């Protein structure tokens, strides 16, 4: 479990400081922020995934997740995803982008991710843990049937050995076709 700050304690402390003349006002959290705090405090990530808050722990609505698959085509690569969560979460799925340029059938070259639970299959009962496991699964079992990168999907379907070669070339920092991929291994 990730040891994050306690929201209620902090709010009480700020309220006490404000009543003593500290001047700091207590910002009321949206339902989305409260739900996200609960989701993050209950995260149960695989050891190959980490979460960080580049804007500090006061901005839970924007964070990064690093995934380092320990199996499959993408073994030992490191892939960084940004999450932007709206104030109406969980009624709206988080916006997720891959910041690591990757040769993958379900991630395009701009970092858009094709994962059904981020689109049509999103339901408020799902949570951040589910999304991270979904992303992790994309690296262990890429889906050539619902691609964003159609070229990669076709190679995966038609010639898995060439797909594996292309993935390794991309991850070690090289060209696949006309596209250069920076090293991520």
Image: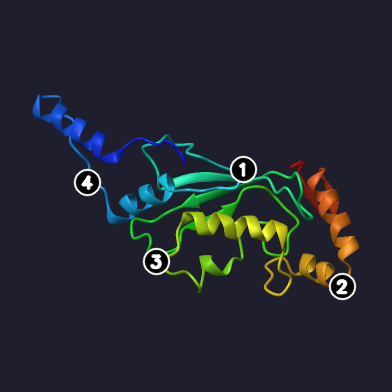
Query: In the displayed structure, does residue 89 sit left or right of residue 21?
Result: right
Colour convention: rainbow
Q: Which element carries disc 2, helix, strand or loop?
A: helix
What kind of element bears circle 1? Answer: loop
Which of discs 1 and 4 lies nearer the camera? The answer is 1
Q: Is residue 177 shown to the viewer in this render?
A: no
Mark nearer the N terminus (1 vs 4): 4
| Circle 3: element type | loop
Q: CA distance from mark 2 to mark 3?
A: 37 Å
Q: Earlier in the sequence, mark 2 or mark 3?
A: 3
Residue underneath mark 2: 158
Residue at x-position 88% and y-position 55%:
165
Q: Which mark is residue 124?
A: 3
Q: Which residue is mark 1?
A: 47
Q: Compare marks 4 and 2 and give the one earlier in the sequence.
A: 4
Q: Residue at x 70, y 49 (%)?
A: 69
How many residues crowd around disc 1 within 10 Å: few (fewer than 14), some, or many (20 or more)?
A: few
């Amino acid at each position: 479990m990730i040891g994050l700050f306690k929201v209620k304690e902090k709010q009480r402390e700020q309220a006490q400081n404000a009543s003593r003349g500290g001047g700091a006002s207590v910002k009321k959290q949206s339902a989305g922020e409260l739900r996200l705090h609960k989701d993050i405090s209950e995260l149960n990530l695989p050891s190959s995934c980490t979460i960080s808050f580049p804007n500090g722990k006061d901005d839970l609505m924007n964070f990064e997740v690093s995934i380092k698959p320990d199996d499959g085509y993408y073994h030992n690569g490191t892939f960084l995803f940004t999450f932007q969560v709206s104030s109406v979460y969980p009624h709206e799925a988080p916006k997720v982008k891959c910041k690591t340029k990757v040769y993958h059938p379900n991630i395009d070259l701009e970092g858009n991710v094709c994962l059904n639970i981020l689109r049509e299959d999103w339901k408020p009962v799902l949570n951040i843990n589910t999304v991270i496991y979904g992303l992790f699964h994309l690296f262990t079992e890429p889906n050539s049937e619902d691609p964003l990168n159609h070229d990669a999907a076709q190679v995966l379907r038609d010639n898995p050995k060439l797909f594996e070669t292309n993935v390794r070339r991309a991850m070690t920092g090289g060209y696949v076709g006309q596209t250069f991929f920076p090293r991520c291994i």
